[in-house]
Image (spheres, rainbow, N blue to C red):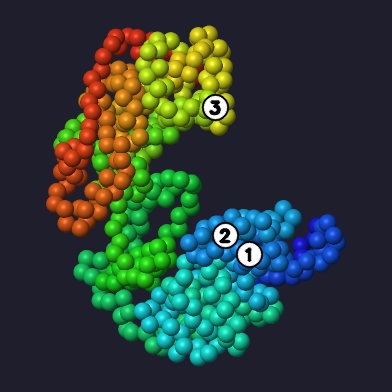
């Protein structure tokens, strides 16, 4: 089916606006167009809106990146909107406004485009517009810059209410071509695609000229001693050395592509006294709705980094850690990354920790197996299951907990039974026996990951610390000690929260280094120590069985 002319014009406009960084940042902003098209069921014309969907980029937007919504249904949401306390529910409600298959997922800014009574709307994040939007006297500066042709909308968290606010401001200012959104960006509108684009560019360029004429010689303060730009070759060499750490931080939840910029404007800003405060303030204000200024404390790069910071290890103790929950992470804390081919093949990663440490770790299975079994059985009392598992025979049947067939939700007890049958092992006949199979298998997965980490990093371990929800599972902790042949210290269960608070406290004056903070955790939190017991040869034989099942899966 041919692309609707209004949608085609929208894509062309988006490409022009999004390709110029003066207009908006990469993947920032959105644009929309409204028009009539036949309803595929009735054949009658209906009013539609095409708008950039969630997560897209204006400069590279395609038809597949557009969300297509029925305007009558979208605007009817006014009657069910229950106020800002229910704001998050409105994005889900947009799904009921989609036309046909609907295209891309609608973004949180969809209401802004649909509720504003204009055929074409552009919402952008230009530097010049943000400078006015984030200024302490932004409303006055906007009036000085544009007179009555551009309105001011006070800060509001992005969402349905912001769309209502902009629509009301447009209705109250019929001569306006757009508005500056406090703490956010700009929105422009027009009767045609060409007029909307021209209005957006007028706001951006006029604001830029205004700032150039009114700005102070050193708007970001004087240069800080020691922060001047390094020679080009030296700064790029340092950037190349730092890049793997930044890439690890940015790609913990999904793969990211970075962009390095050492232009004169960037280097000048980084050298100035105001850069730390100004760099953090707009984003924090946008995410929290706080009016600012907002003090910002950098904590661990990830909840796992905070959890590892709260590991109650003694100073100079050689420890491994297990952050356990639905999924688990096992690893070591190192001074430098391990970048060998062997570590890559073993699926270990290097992630930046507190105080420049490196978390050398890999993901392993956690309590997901048991959680899915409990859902199938309809049981909620984990305590009774663990008691039954403690009475069941040890290591009677074990499976490769990392096998791909265990990753999806569903009938987990049957999949565990099938894995046991396929490897010639007894099939667990009761929930207690299945639970014991799971816990024995997880202990073997812990053993394998910790042994691998020691070998790959050439680092001996004297104790294993289990933090997170799994620290409350006494049977799993004891089995891990037995499987690894190492003492296990369990706790704290809320390590991620404690590590976060610990780093914030240090930033605000708590004396001592990371080791001192860990000693504080050890003194104040309930911990349980488990010593290894039983015959190590039994666990060695069980480990060989799981290696056999791993080869079977391969």
Q: Residues within 10 Å of mark 1 (few under 14, many from 20)?
A: some
Q: Can you say which quadrant of the picture contains the C terminus?
A: top right
The residue to which callout 1 is attached is: 77
Indicate which disc, 1 or 3, sits on the residue closer to the N terminus.
1
Indicate which disc, 2 or 3, sits on the residue closer to the N terminus.
2
Q: Residue at x 50, y 9 (%)?
A: 425
Q: Residues within 10 Å of mark 2 (few under 14, many from 20)?
A: many
Residue 195: tell me if it is visible: yes
Estimate the x, y position of residue 440 in percent, counting from the top left.
40, 18
Q: Can you say which quadrant of the picture contains the N terminus?
A: bottom right
Estimate the x, y position of residue 278 in percent, counting from the top left.
34, 70
Indicate which disc, 2 or 1, sits on the residue closer to the N terminus.
1
Q: Residue at x 38, y 78 (%)?
A: 135
Estimate the x, y position of residue 246 in percent, counting from the top left.
38, 51
The residue to which callout 2 is attached is: 90
Estimate the x, y position of residue 73 in percent, counting from the top left.
69, 63
Element type at marker 2? helix
Q: Is 201 situated above or below 460?
A: below
Q: Does 38 sit left or right of 194 as displayed?
A: right
Element type at marker 1? helix
Give whichever of 326, 543 is nearer the camera.
326
Q: Is 453 situated above or below 135?
A: above
The residue to which callout 3 is attached is: 376
């Amino acid at each position: 089916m041919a692309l609707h002319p209004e949608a085609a014009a929208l894509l062309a406009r988006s490409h022009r606006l999004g390709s110029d960084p003066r207009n908006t940042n990469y993947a920032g902003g959105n644009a929309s167009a409204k028009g009539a098209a036949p309803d595929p069921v009735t054949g009658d014309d209906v009013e539609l809106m095409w708008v950039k969907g969630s997560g897209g980029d204006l400069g590279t937007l395609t038809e597949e990146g557009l969300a297509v919504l029925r305007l009558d249904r979208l605007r009817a949401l006014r009657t069910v909107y229950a106020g800002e306390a229910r704001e998050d529910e409105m994005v889900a409600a947009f799904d009921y406004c989609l036309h046909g298959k609907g295209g891309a997922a609608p973004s949180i800014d969809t209401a802004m485009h649909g509720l504003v009574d204009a055929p074409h709307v552009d919402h952008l994040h230009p530097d010049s517009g943000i400078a006015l939007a984030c200024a302490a006297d932004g409303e006055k500066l906007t009036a000085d810059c544009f007179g009555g042709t551009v309105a001011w909308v006070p800060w509001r968290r992005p969402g349905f209410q912001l769309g209502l606010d902009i629509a009301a401001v447009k209705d109250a200012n019929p001569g306006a071509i757009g508005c500056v959104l406090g703490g956010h960006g700009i929105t422009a509108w027009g009767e045609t695609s060409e007029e909307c684009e021209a209005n957006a560019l007028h706001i951006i360029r006029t604001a830029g000229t205004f700032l150039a004429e009114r700005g102070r010689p050193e708007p970001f303060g004087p240069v800080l001693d020691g922060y001047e730009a390094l020679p080009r070759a030296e700064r790029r060499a340092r950037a190349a050395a730092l890049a793997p750490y930044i890439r690890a931080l940015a790609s913990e939840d999904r793969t990211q592509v970075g962009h390095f910029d050492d232009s004169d404007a960037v280097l000048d800003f980084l050298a100035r006294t105001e850069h730390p405060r100004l760099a953090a303030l707009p984003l924090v204000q946008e995410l929290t709705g706080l009016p600012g200024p907002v003090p910002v404390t950098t904590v661990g790069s990830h909840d796992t980094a905070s959890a590892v910071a709260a590991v109650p290890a003694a100073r100079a103790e050689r420890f491994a850690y297990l952050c356990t929950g639905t999924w688990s992470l096992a690893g070591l804390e190192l001074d430098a990354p391990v970048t060998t081919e062997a570590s890559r093949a073993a699926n270990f990663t290097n992630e930046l920790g507190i105080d420049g440490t490196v978390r050398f770790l890999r993901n392993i299975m956690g309590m997901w197996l048991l959680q899915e079994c409990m859902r199938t059985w309809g049981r909620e009392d984990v305590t009774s299951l663990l008691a039954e598992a403690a009475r069941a025979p040890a290591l009677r049947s074990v499976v490769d907990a990392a096998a791909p067939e265990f990753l999806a939700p569903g009938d987990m007890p049957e999949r565990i039974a099938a894995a046991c049958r396929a490897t010639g092992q007894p099939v667990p006949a009761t929930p207690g026996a299945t639970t014991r199979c799971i816990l024995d298998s997880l202990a073997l997965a812990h053993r394998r990951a910790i042994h691998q980490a020691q070998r790959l990093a050439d680092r001996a371990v004297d104790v294993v610390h289990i933090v997170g929800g799994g620290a409350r599972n006494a049977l799993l902790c004891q089995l891990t000690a037995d499987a690894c042949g190492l003492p296990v210290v369990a706790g704290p269960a809320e390590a991620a929260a404690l590590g976060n608070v610990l780093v914030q406290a240090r930033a605000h004056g708590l004396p001592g280094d990371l080791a001192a903070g860990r000693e504080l955790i050890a003194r104040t939190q309930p911990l349980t120590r488990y010593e290894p017991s039983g015959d190590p040869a039994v666990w060695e034989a069980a480990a060989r069985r799981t290696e056999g099942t791993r080869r079977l899966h391969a």
